[in-house]
Image: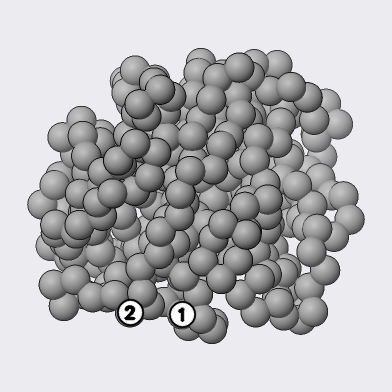
Amino acid sequence: MPKNPSYEIQFLDEHTLPAGFNFQNETFGGISGIDFKNGELIMINDSPSNPLLFSAEFILDDFKLDTLVFTSVTKLKTDAFYQENALDMESIRFDGKDYLISTEGNINKDLAPRIFKINRKAEFLASYPLPDYFLPKGNNQPRHNGVFEGLSMDLNSNGFWFANELPLENDGKTPKLFNTNSPIRISHYDRGQNQITRQYAMDLDRIIKIPLLPFAINGLTEILQLEKDKFLVLERAYSAGHKSRGNRVKLFLVDVSKATDIKDIVQLEDTSENISYAEKSLLFDFKKVKKKTTDRIVDNLEGLCFGPMLPNGNRSLIIASDDNFNSFGPQLNQFIILELKSN
């Protein structure tokens, strides 16, 4: 990995909400995607049976969280699109006056992942067509529960970037404790052309923590475009058997400027030796701030967005956890606030 990246990260603050926190008779939890604009934080859950969009006032005072006040919750239920697709929502972005959302679908039930647009009343507006290799039973196909976790508006908002959590089945292996070829695809969608116009491979890190039970995973959980060819990428690993301390979360700077455009390559597995991958630089290992977090826990961090500008002119970052509704044991509704510094 390249050293001396052009950005660095500083921890600022952490905040948690109690398990089972309720707002307007809806349980807050399972938060997988967030975004911020003009003092408003929007958050979606990944519950197909009860897909919700929360909004809250989010204010920093100096470099600390001052205000997190919930203002609305809306259920996605009024359109046939919601009934026909599994709304396992994973990311959300402000898109002008509307919202752009990604969902993983349900690959095991042949329900395709989608990227779609809604208005502020949660009414369906549009869905974007995807290549066959992103669809169930296509000429490659995604892994179940490993599809569109990352979503970012591009710099001029004419299109958007998105990324899958795990390699497609014929792109490479899922990460293991040893080094593997585990590429995910970072894709740019041009809405003028209504198609993917650029796509790059990025190799996921291996799993570091030895699982005490037979399950471990590492995948991409979010992306944010910083510059023309540079992105923030959040990777979250989980090793079973460590109770609330099984997560290992890292934030990377990813540069695609020298990477091969792979949009027309259906299967990467047999061609990976001829492909230049995106370059990754480790910006921040959340393990370093465990002493500053609730119960020394870094939970299942999945949401990432730019937050308010800081008094020194730097950007803040907001990261949020998916507590899985505490269905696998006690977890946190956790918000971590960072400072993004340019070198």
Chain-order first, disc 1 or disc 2:
2
Answer whether residue 127 is visible to the viewer in this image: no
Front-most of 251 and 261? 251
Q: Quadrant of the C terminus?
A: top right
Q: Name which residue lies at 64% across and 23% down.
A: 255
Which residue is identified by label 2? Answer: 20
Left or right: 329 as drawn, with respect to 15: right
Left or right: 288 as drawn, with respect to 145: right
Q: Name which residue lies at 32% across and 23% down.
A: 157
**Residue 130 sits in which quadrant?**
top left
Front-most of 291 and 193? 291
The residue positioned farthest toward the right in the image shown:
178
Q: Label for residue 326?
A: 1
State if disc 2 and disc 1 touch (CB < 8 Å).
yes
Bin the neighbour count of mark 1 within 10 Å (Cα to Cα): few under 14, some 14-19, many 20 and up.
Answer: some
Answer whether residue 339 is visible to the viewer in this image: yes
Q: Name which residue lies at 34% across and 36% down.
A: 62
Front-most of 39 and 165? 39
**SS type, badge 2:** loop
**SS type, badge 1:** helix
Q: Label for residue 41?
A: none
Q: What amino acid type is highlighted by mark number 2?
A: Gly
Depicted 321 relative to depicted 204: above or below: below
Marks 1 and 2, how far apart at CA: 9 Å
Report x, y in % for residue 205: 75, 47
Q: What amino acid type is highlighted by mark number 1?
A: Asn
Bin the neighbour count of mark 2 within 10 Å (Cα to Cα): few under 14, some 14-19, many 20 and up.
Answer: few
Depicted 64 relative to depicted 231: above or below: below
Left or right: 175 as drawn, with respect to 343: right
Report x, y in % for residue 33: 39, 52
